[in-house]
Image (cartoon, rainbow, N blue to C red):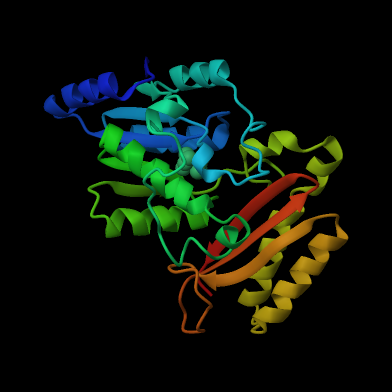
C-alpha cells in the first residue's frame, strides 16, 4: 500500500492510474478504523480497480467544545488494517495541507437547508465542515466513486446534494450500517463508552426498531411515537437530542403518501453522542 501525505504526489499517482484506464474509489474516513469502515473499503474494492482511503480528522467539522482534540487516533493500527484490506493508497494529509491558509477566513462549501436540521441544528457548522473537506478530498483524488456509510444518513444526503449541485463527476455509493451482535452501530466514538454505558447503548437501535414496528402495524400518530421514544431513552439514562420520523429522500416531515421513511435518532450517554437510523417503506 502506498501512503501519501501531500497532494502533489497523490495527484501524480492518480493520473498514472487514470491514464492506465483504471477506475478509482475514494473512501473518506477520520481514521480509528473499525468493521464499518472495512465494509466501505470492501464495497469499493468490488466496484473499481484502485481504492484510496483518506484518514484525516477534520478540524472544520468539530464545533467549539467538541471532541476534536480527544478524537481517537490510531494511525499505526489503521495502516495495518488497510494493508490487510489490500487498499492501494492511504492519503494522510496534515491540517496545513488541506487548510493551507488556516481555517479562519478560508473558503467553505455550504449546503443550506439540509445542513441546518437534526444534527446540524445541534452542531452548527458541522455539515459545512464535512462538505468542505469532502470537496477538497474529491478535488485531490478525483475519484470515479466515493463510498459513505448509511449510519451517517444526514451526512450522506448532504454529500449527495452537494455533489449534484456542484456538478461534481463522482458517483456516491452508500453502504448499509454495520452493527455489533447486539445491534449497536459500529462507530469510532463507541470507544468512549464505559462498560456500563456500552450495555445500555443498543437501546438506541432497539428504540428505532420498535418505532418502525409500530408504524408498520398501523400507528399514525408520529408525534406520540417520537415523544414516547425520547421518554424511554431518557428513562434508560440517555440524553436524547432528537428522535425524528422523516422522509428518507429529503429529511422533510412525512406527508403520508407512501414515501420511504427514515427514523433518525441522536442521543448522548454522558459525553458520548451516538447517532443511528432505520429506513423502510411503510
Ligand atoms: O464520516 C466521517 O468519518 C467524516 O465526516 C468524513 C466523511 C470522513 C469527513 O471528514
Does any portion of residue 142 appear in the rendered image?
yes
Q: Is residue 153 above or below residue 56?
A: below
**Nearest to the observer: residue 146 or residue 279:** 146
Q: Position of residue 247 (x, y in %)?
A: 49, 72
**Nearest to the observer: residue 282 or residue 207:** 207
Residue at 22% in and 48% down: 169
Does any portion of residue 175 appear in the rendered image?
no
> For the N terminus, which image quadrant?
top left
In the displayed structure, does residue 65 sit left or right of residue 14? right
Q: Position of residue 181 (x, y in %)?
A: 69, 41
Q: Is residue 205 above or below residue 13?
A: below
In the displayed structure, does residue 104 sit left or right of residue 210? left
Residue 185, located in which quarter of the rendered image? top right
**Nearest to the observer: residue 48 or residue 118:** 118
Residue at 74% in and 60% down: 240
**Nearest to the observer: residue 168 or residue 214:** 168
Q: Position of residue 153 (x, y in %)?
A: 51, 55
Instruction: Point out the residue furthest to the front here.
Output: 105
Residue at 47% in and 18% down: 84
In the displayed structure, does residue 45 sit left or right of residue 182? left
How many numbered marks have been drawn onto this rendered protein structure?
Answer: 0
> For the C terminus, which image quadrant?
bottom right
In the displayed structure, does residue 122 sit left or right of residue 254? right
Q: Position of residue 188 (x, y in %)?
A: 62, 36
Amino acid at each position: 500500500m502506498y501512503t501519501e501525505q501531500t497532494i502533489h504526489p497523490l495527484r501524480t499517482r492518480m493520473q498514472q492510474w487514470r491514464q492506465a484506464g483504471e477506475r478509482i474509489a475514494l473512501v473518506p474516513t477520520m481514521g480509528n478504523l473499525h468493521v464499518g469502515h472495512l465494509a466501505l473499503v470492501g464495497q469499493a474494492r468490488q466496484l473499481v480497480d484502485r481504492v484510496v482511503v483518506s484518514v484525516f480528522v477534520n478540524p472544520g467539522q468539530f464545533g467549539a467544545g467538541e471532541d476534536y482534540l480527544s478524537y481517537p487516533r490510531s494511525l499505526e493500527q489503521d495502516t495495518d488494517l488497510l494493508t490487510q484490506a489490500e487498499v492501494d493508497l492511504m492519503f494522510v494529509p496534515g491540517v496545513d495541507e488541506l487548510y493551507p491558509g488556516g481555517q479562519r477566513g478560508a473558503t467553505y462549501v455550504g449546503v443550506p437547508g439540509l445542513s441546518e436540521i437534526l444534527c446540524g441544528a445541534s452542531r452548527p457548522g458541522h455539515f459545512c465542515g464535512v462538505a468542505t473537506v469532502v470537496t477538497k478530498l474529491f478535488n485531490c483524488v478525483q475519484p470515479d466513486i466515493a463510498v459513505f456509510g448509511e449510519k451517517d444518513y444526514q451526512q450522506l444526503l448532504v454529500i449527495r446534494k452537494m455533489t449534484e449541485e456542484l456538478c461534481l463527476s463522482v458517483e456516491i455509493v452508500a453502504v448499509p450500517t454495520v452493527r455489533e451482535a447486539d445491534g449497536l452501530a459500529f462507530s469510532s466514538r463507541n470507544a468512549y463508552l464505559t462498560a456500563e454505558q456500552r450495555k445500555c447503548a443498543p437501546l438506541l437501535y432497539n428504540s428505532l426498531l420498535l418505532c418502525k414496528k409500530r408504524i408498520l402495524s398501523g400507528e399514525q400518530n408520529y408525534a406520540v411515537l417520537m415523544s414516547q421514544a425520547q421518554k424511554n431513552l431518557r428513562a434508560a439514562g440517555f440524553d436524547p437530542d432528537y428522535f425524528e420520523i422523516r422522509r428518507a429522500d429529503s429529511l422533510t416531515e412525512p406527508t403520508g403518501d407512501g414515501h420511504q421513511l427514515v427514523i433518525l435518532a441522536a442521543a448522548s450517554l454522558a459525553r458520548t453522542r451516538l447517532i443511528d437510523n432505520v429506513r423502510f417503506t411503510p
